[in-house]
Amino acid sequence: MTPPQEARGGRHALGTRAARNLATTTKSVPQMQGVSPRWLLRQLPWVRADAGTYRVNRRLTYRLGDGLVTFVNDGAAVRVVPPELAELPPLRGLAGEDVLDVLAGRFEQREYGPGDTIAAAGRPADAVHLIAHGKVALRTPGEYGGEAETGILADGRFFGDRVLLGTAEEWPCTFRALTPTTVLTLSREAIEELTGRYDALRAHLDAYRDAPAPPQTGHGEAAIDLASGHEGEHVLPGTFVDYEASPREYELSVTQTLLRVHSRVADLYNGPMDQVEQQLRLTVEAVRERQEHELVNNREFGLLHNADLRQRIQTRGGPPTPDDLDELLARRRKSRFFLAHPRTIAAFGRECTRRGVYPSTLPVDGPGGSEQRVQAWRGVPIYPCDKIPVSPSGTSSILVLRTGEDDQGVIGLHRTGIPGEIRPGLSVRFTGVDERALLTYLVSAYYSAAVLVPDALGVLENVEIAR
């Protein structure tokens, strides 16, 4: 007779495979790879918009010619879109598309290499220059020798527009190409010829030149007349504060989805974890991720598209350097935090290492109330945000924000107190069971963002992170 252990292949005890039939397993909750820290949602101060709309009232601001000029190209040949010439202050409001067509046709394309001078300081201003592609540095003689860099112009910017007025002026600084640059140029000779041929153009430029400039502050706002330091009984000036006639209104956007769970799954497969609860948890995470994406990228209210053109600056050499971040900080008061793609933060770290500079770190409250340390520059934390896009050529952007209504900064908008609210501005509502026995839940998030004054938000554009 064969012994039992030999009949069972020489085993002397119950195997683990068979034993699992009588055992339970320890399980994790469903994991989700797409969950990020969502620093922007955490750091924005949120304001309740009861009517679903938030109106930003500002002082009247004169804004002329601070837009960008658009170009089209046929291969290497570039031309300006004629209506876009109205972005030049002297041409703003010019009636007659034919005149703009003729003006656009007289621009000549010129190519400059890195280091080439487009216009030299002190020389007569003799042309209008439109930057179709590339970066141009503005340089002036320094007080102690050498040159001082006062700004960067890039795609769509222009200079020399006052040449259209026919006044004898000199270039205030040297314009030098930093990268291969394509410039469209309209010479003074061409301008004189066209103004002599077209009466409408000449009359428009004469009216613009002779019109008194409205009194305004350094920020472009309508000035408030005041008197100070006087003695005696001088007549004090009368004044008033003018407002924008058509203030910007931000309407709440919405991200919604219908979550469906079969009743059989909810009834029979509900332990040890609640299936509906886990389905809702993952859906809410996805909605919150989309919410942060929209706050950064939405063309109506996203931060990348709502930064004032005068608050968009270019890098000095491509990669993000300490000088570039200092320039961002210098343009506003009480900057609360930077926002950058993780690869951009890594590129900034490489530039700091190359210079022998070591940024500090700051303790901040992370997810779940746990303390985390993030990289900082000049005491301003740099939060990672993977919603900021990275172009195929390896460029991205860095944002810096001043936040809060009290500081006239950037604020988040939401509507609280809605039915089924599980978080401020986010609700889950059971909508019923259909003929397929599917339980349906409506998940909704209402949100937007508002920039109260232009200098509350700054963007460093065309940051090279692949070098």
Image: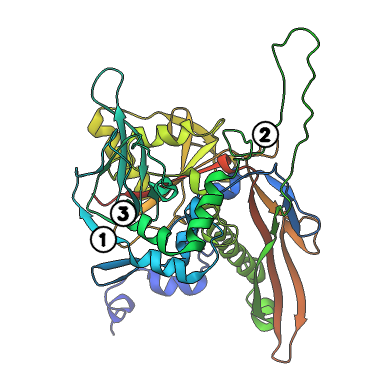
Q: Which mark is residue 189?
A: 3
Upstream in sequence: badge 2 or badge 3: 3
Amino acid identity at mark 3: Glu
In the depicted structure, whether residue 134 falls above or below residue 255? above
Q: Secondary structure at mark 2?
A: loop
Amino acid identity at mark 1: Gln
Count neighbours of disc 1 (C-alpha within 10 A) and say few if under 14, some if 14 to 19, many if 20 or more: some
Give the CA separation, mark 1 to mark 3.
Answer: 16 Å
Residue 307 appears in the figure: no
Along the horizontal axis of the image, is 213 left or right of 184? right
Percent position (x, y) of residue 167?
41, 42
Q: Which mark is residue 223?
A: 2
Percent position (x, y) of residue 408?
66, 38
In the depicted structure, whether residue 307 falls above or below residue 17? above
Count neighbours of disc 3 (C-alpha within 10 A) and say few if under 14, some if 14 to 19, many if 20 or more: few
Q: Residue drawn 77% across and 25% down? A: 237
Q: Which mark is residue 109?
A: 1
Q: Secondary structure at mark 1?
A: strand
Residue mark closest to the camera, 2 vs 3: 3
Percent position (x, y) of residue 438?
69, 84
Q: Identify the colour scheme used.
A: rainbow
Q: Secondary structure at mark 3?
A: helix
Residue at the limit of the structure toward the bottom, as seen here: 435
| Nearer to me, 449 or 200 | 200
| Nearer to me, 114 or 35 | 114
Q: Which mark is residue 186?
A: none
Upstream in sequence: badge 1 or badge 3: 1
Q: Residue drawn 67% across and 34% down? A: 223
Along the horizontal axis of the image, is 287 left or right of 90? right
Count neighbours of disc 2 (C-alpha within 10 A) and say few if under 14, some if 14 to 19, many if 20 or more: some
Give the CA separation, mark 2 to mark 3.
Answer: 37 Å
Residue 3 appears in the figure: yes
